[in-house]
């Protein structure tokens, strides 16, 4: 921003016309050319104009030259997840009145969207994305890549909560980024997340490894744990990695979380380790780690509901509780699902309830009429594949081949066709996407 633009900003802010500002100092045309950066101005006239506007020009110029560096600092603080620094710089930037009128306005708006993502304020993020796409037509290659990065992250954060977002869309968006201009290798982590949700395990692992290398190089150890967690989640069977080696890797990451004081990542890793045991039908060990994660989780949070379901599911599959206690816990789960207004978990606990009551016909009727359509419509891939497999086997067992074919057709029509007999885990592992 030129000095003249600072004057223009404060003149318009104070509702002063060019004629009134220039009165008895200089001509109106001179003010117009000065604000447009076409002419310089003498110190004497500059002093009089400054006094009339009531601004400290030296202070404003210092703030102007400071903006670019502080925006870069804010960007880095968000990447490093330094919450204290994030908030401090945010307040500092908000105190600069002309920042939205400066040449850094686009960068500032986009970083504000990135801030909202960090705070999980998704409606606010979406609003800025839409505003940027409508109003920011001429932006630098770096800003284009930053906007694409934010859009990709937003897509990852919302695809399972809306029917309008395709979970492959994040990859399509992020692949458009010009890394040579952007130079922010953190985006590899979000590209890995996109491939993970799109079931592209090889590429998910590849990009997670690139992200991990970047995080280690930049001493961003908390994000390195996220990248390493994502890498571990790409191993589906003991053909991919020795199970004890996998467990050891999880335990090492858990130990790193303890050293770094990050209890949330520790809770996630304990939950995910439980998933690995669950996939191998070691329900006792699965329940053990789910319970440890659950014990550390705030009872009022949505994560508690998710982890509580994982724990109860393991207890049910492994027959670790007597039927009376299991029914009591399932009813607690139903109450929690209602409290958190989570239709998916309400459905899952209702299925557990029907199973506990040995109501086989009611179970499969509910599965066909309520659960499968709900899982498909909300992009819950793991659940509709798992329960689709169960329903498919049930139809085949009863010789209801027409219903089995209709089920396959349903998956095809919903745009999510899979080979239904594939074995997948019901409980979902967790990731930090930010």
Image (cartoon, rainbow, N blue to C red):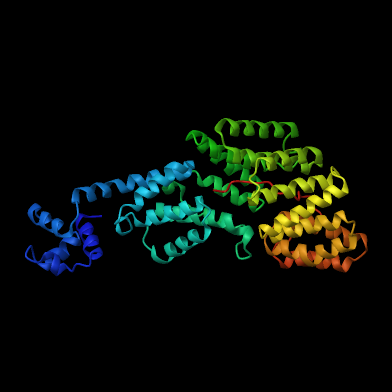
| Total numbered labels | 0
Residue occupying the far right of the picture:
398
- Left/right placement of residue 377 relative to residue 398 reads left
Residue 38 lies, in percent from the top left, at: 16, 60
Which residue is painted at 57% across and 30% down in the image?
259
Instruction: Give the quadrant of residue 13.
Output: bottom left
Residue 243 lies, in percent from the top left, at: 75, 34
* Residue 252 against residue 223 in the figure, above or below: above
The one nearer the camera, 79 or 314, is 314
The one nearer the camera, 204 or 381, is 381
Residue 359 lies, in percent from the top left, at: 89, 59
- Left/right placement of residue 103 relative to residue 430 reads left
Residue 145 in sight: no
Residue 362 lies, in percent from the top left, at: 87, 63
- Left/right placement of residue 79 relative to residue 316 reads left
Q: Quadrant of the N terminus?
A: bottom left
Which residue is painted at 42% across and 46% down in the image?
87
The one nearer the camera, 36 or 267, is 267
- Left/right placement of residue 204 relative to residue 5 reads right
* Residue 412 against residue 265 in the figure, above or below: below
The one nearer the camera, 183 or 78, is 78
Residue 311 in sight: yes
């Amino acid at each position: 921003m030129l000095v003249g633009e600072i004057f223009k900003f404060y003149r318009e802010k104070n509702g002063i016309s060019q004629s009134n500002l220039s009165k008895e100092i200089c001509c109106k045309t001179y003010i117009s050319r000065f604000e447009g950066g076409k002419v310089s101005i003498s110190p004497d006239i500059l002093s009089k104009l400054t006094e009339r506007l009531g601004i400290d020009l030296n202070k404003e110029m210092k703030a102007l030259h400071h903006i670019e560096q502080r925006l870069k600092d804010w960007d880095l603080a968000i990447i490093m997840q330094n919450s204290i620094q994030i908030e401090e710089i945010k307040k500092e930037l908000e105190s600069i009145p002309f920042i939205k009128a400066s040449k850094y306005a686009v960068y500032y708006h986009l970083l504000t969207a990135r801030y909202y993502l960090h705070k999980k304020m998704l409606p606010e993020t979406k609003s800025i994305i839409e505003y940027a796409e409508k109003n920011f037509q001429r932006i630098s290659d770096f800003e284009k890549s930053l906007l694409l990065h934010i859009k990709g992250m937003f897509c990852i954060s919302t695809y399972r909560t809306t029917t309008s977002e395709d979970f492959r869309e994040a990859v399509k968006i992020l692949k458009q980024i010009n890394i040579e201009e952007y130079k922010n290798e953190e985006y590899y982590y979000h590209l890995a997340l996109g491939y993970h949700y799109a079931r592209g395990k090889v590429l998910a692992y590849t990009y997670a490894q690139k992200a991990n290398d970047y995080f280690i190089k930049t001493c961003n150890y908390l994000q390195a744990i996220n990248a390493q967690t994502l890498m571990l989640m790409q191993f589906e069977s003991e053909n991919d990695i020795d199970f004890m080696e996998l467990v050891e890797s999880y335990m090492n990451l858990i130990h790193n979380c303890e050293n770094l004081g990050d209890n949330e990542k520790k809770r996630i890793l304990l939950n995910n380790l439980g998933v690995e045991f669950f996939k191998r039908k070691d329900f006792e060990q699965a329940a053990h780690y789910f319970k440890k994660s659950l014990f550390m989780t705030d009872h009022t949070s949505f994560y508690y509901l998710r982890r509580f379901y994982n724990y109860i599911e393991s207890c049910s599959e492994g027959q670790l509780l007597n039927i009376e206690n299991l029914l009591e816990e399932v009813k607690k789960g139903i109450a929690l699902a209602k409290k958190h207004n989570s239709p998916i978990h309400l459905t899952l606990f209702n299925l557990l309830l029907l199973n506990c009551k040995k109501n086989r016909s009611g179970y499969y009727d509910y599965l066909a009429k309520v659960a499968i359509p709900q899982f498909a419509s909300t992009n819950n891939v793991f659940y509709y594949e798992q329960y689709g497999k169960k329903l498919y086997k049930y139809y085949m067992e009863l010789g209801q081949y027409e219903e089995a074919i209709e089920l396959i057709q349903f998956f095809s029509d919903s745009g999510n066709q899979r080979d239904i007999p594939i074995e997948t885990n019901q409980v979902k592992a967790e990731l930090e996407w930010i």
